[in-house]
């Protein structure tokens, strides 16, 4: 990756730092310092990408950009190690992470498939995929794996969950759930994880994929006679952007349609308007769906 050059769009996608912020930092701090290609467009080195990923990690933990951009790579990694939340890693996750880090990528898919058979879909999603996602992110920041490894893992999990989900009987009961991500949220693994958990409870899922415009979310929910709009949010966009879009979506949706939202992007969001429910854990999904099925709200009174 050292000799690879990345466009500003790719940097935005890989780091979760908006292009507007990148330009402000460039003017204000002199970092990043992109080159220009033949069309005079900004291009960034692999080294700058790595620094920006580290900086984003520390920004999400409350540090200021003006302080971070002045630090060298060693100090940034040291701070990342000091500030990261220590999460116990299971033997299964350790095994998968070791395969990924060793470069033996051909061995990853069969091991993931074996774990799915061993655990069953519900526990595979919550006990293997969820902690593995976190572990892969931490391994990247620690320099133990590269972008290629991270992307390869994501694609293997995406393919496996898609296949597993297609094998589930289509939910025809209640609740009816529209599942998507907010505009600008490009990460779709969380969507598949939620879809699996909801499908196992018999919910009827209308999945729109990622980055659906707010007006189209409303249209899909209304035309699909949905009870719930469920959103998956990574920490890609930042809590303020997520909260702002959620508030706007709540105003656009009919009152009889509630919003469920979860993922690392909502961690730290403490207050949301009525009829927006925040989920901190995948394990909360099953009882929430079951409660809807036992005691469906009277939408006519909302």
Image: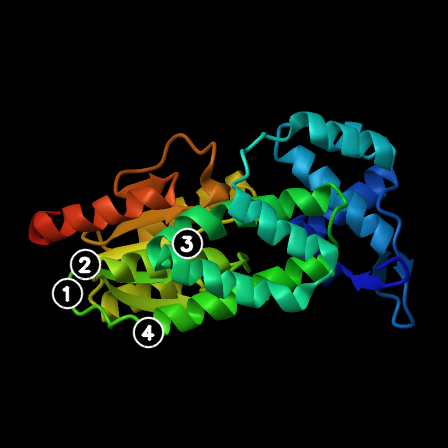
Residue at coordinates 24% horizontally, 72% vertically from top-left?
A: 169
Q: Nearer the viewer, mark 4 or mark 2?
A: 4
Q: Residue at x 79, y 51 (%)?
A: 49
**Contact, mark 3 vs mark 1 (Cβ under 8 Å):** no
Using the numbered discs, state the Cα–Cα distance from disc 3 to disc 1 in whole angstroms: 23 Å
- Asked where in the image residue 125 lies, by quadrant, the reply is bottom left
Mark positioned earlier in the residue sequence (4 or 2): 4
Where does the image place residue 287, in percent across and percent down from the top left? 22, 44
Lateral position of residue 42 relative to residue 269, left or right: right
Q: Which x, y percent locates residue 24?
A: 76, 44
Q: CA distance from mark 1 to mark 4?
A: 17 Å
Instruction: Give left or right: position of 165 versus 109.
Output: left
Q: Secondary structure at mark 1?
A: loop
Crowding at dot 1, Cα within 10 Å, few <14 / some 14-19 / many 20+, comes out as few
Q: To which residue does mark 2 refer?
A: 175
53 relative position to 162: left or right: right
Q: Could you tell me how far apart the alpha carbons at marks 3 and 2 are, in whole angstroms?
A: 21 Å
The CA span between labels 2 and 1 is 6 Å
- What residue is shown with label 1? 173
């Amino acid at each position: 990756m050292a000799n690879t050059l990345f466009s500003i769009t790719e940097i935005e996608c890989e780091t979760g730092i908006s292009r507007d912020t990148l330009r402000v930092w460039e003017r204000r701090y002199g970092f990043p310092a992109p080159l220009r290609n033949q069309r005079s467009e900004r291009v960034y080195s692999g080294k700058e990408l790595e620094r920006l990923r580290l900086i984003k990690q520390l920004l999400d933990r409350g540090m200021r950009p003006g302080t971070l951009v002045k630090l060298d790579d060693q100090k940034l990694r040291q701070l990342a190690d000091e500030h990261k939340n220590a999460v116990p890693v299971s033997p299964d996750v350790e095994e998968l992470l070791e395969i990924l880090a060793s470069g033996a990528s051909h061995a990853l898919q069969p091991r993931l498939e074996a774990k799915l058979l061993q655990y069953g879909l519900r526990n595979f999603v919550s006990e293997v995929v969820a902690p593995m996602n976190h572990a892969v992110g931490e391994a990247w920041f620690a320099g133990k794996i590269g972008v290629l490894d991270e992307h390869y893992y994501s694609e293997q999990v995406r393919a496996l969950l898609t296949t597993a989900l297609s094998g589930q009987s289509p939910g025809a009961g209640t609740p009816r759930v529209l599942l998507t991500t907010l505009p600008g949220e490009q990460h779709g693994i969380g969507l598949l994880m939620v879809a699996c958990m909801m499908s196992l409870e018999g919910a009827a899922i209308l999945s729109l994929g990622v980055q659906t415009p707010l007006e189209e979310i409303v249209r899909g929910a209304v035309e699909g006679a949905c009870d719930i709009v469920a959103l998956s949010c990574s920490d890609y966009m930042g809590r303020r952007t997520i909260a702002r879009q959620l508030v706007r979506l709540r105003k656009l949706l009919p009152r009889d349609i509630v919003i469920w939202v979860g993922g690392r992007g909502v961690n730290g969001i403490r207050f949301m308007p009525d009829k927006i429910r925040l989920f901190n854990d995948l394990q909360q999904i099953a009882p929430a769906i079951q409660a809807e099925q036992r005691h469906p709200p009277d939408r006519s009174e909302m």
